[in-house]
Amino acid sequence: MNPRPPLPPFTEETALIKVQAAEDAWNSRDPERVSLAYTEDTEWRNRTEFIHGREEVVEFLKRKWSRELDYRLKKELWGFRNHRMAVRFEYEFHDPSGQWYRSYGNELWEFDELGYMKRRFASINDMTIEASERKFLWER
């Protein structure tokens, strides 16, 4: 695999670049694109689901974005050290019935020496919101 810069050990500048790249990829809602940031044998915990490997990441994201419509995410670097980062995030989406949600959470990330994410552990809380309460509005 080719290096995926920026590479660890991270500085504040390179950590911020990595977080923005993740936000941009996830907002594409393209499971294949998102999966390319992770090692072939990546390990995830997403809420109560445990995911192993890129193929499972792609399947997970396909399921996620079939239920979480008009998904829009913001990520913020919380801290970093060497090859690890802590990120806070919030995102909004609506379900197929039109109910809007805002989800908040934290992620712990661990990268390999080539800049691919080996581990992603996410803790997430959801709340229902009215469409008028949305923060993340964008043109389609």
Image (cartoon, helix red, strand yellow):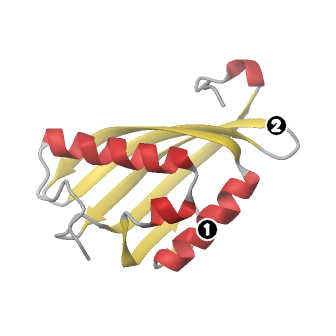
Residue neighbourhood size for the residue with mark 1, other residues' Cα within 10 Å, grouped as few (<14), some (14–19), many (≥20): some
Q: Amino acid at mark 1?
A: Phe
Q: Give how far across and how far down residue 125 sits, in percent.
A: 59, 46
In this rendering, is residue 15 above or below 135?
Answer: below
In this rendering, is residue 123 above or below 113?
Answer: above
What residue sits 14% from the left and 51% below the top? 10
What residue sits 34% from the left and 41% below the top? 20
What residue sits 23% from the left and 58% below the top? 84
Q: Give how far across and how far down residue 94 sits, in percent.
A: 75, 40
Q: Which quadrant, please, contains the C terminus? A: top right
Q: Is residue 125 left or right of residue 86?
A: right
What residue sits 46% from the left and 69% below the top? 44
Q: Give how far across and how far down residue 82 sits, in percent.
A: 13, 57
Secondary structure beneath disc 2?
Answer: loop
Q: Amino acid at mark 2?
A: Gln
Q: Is residue 116 left or right of residue 69?
A: left
Q: Which mark is residue 60?
A: 1
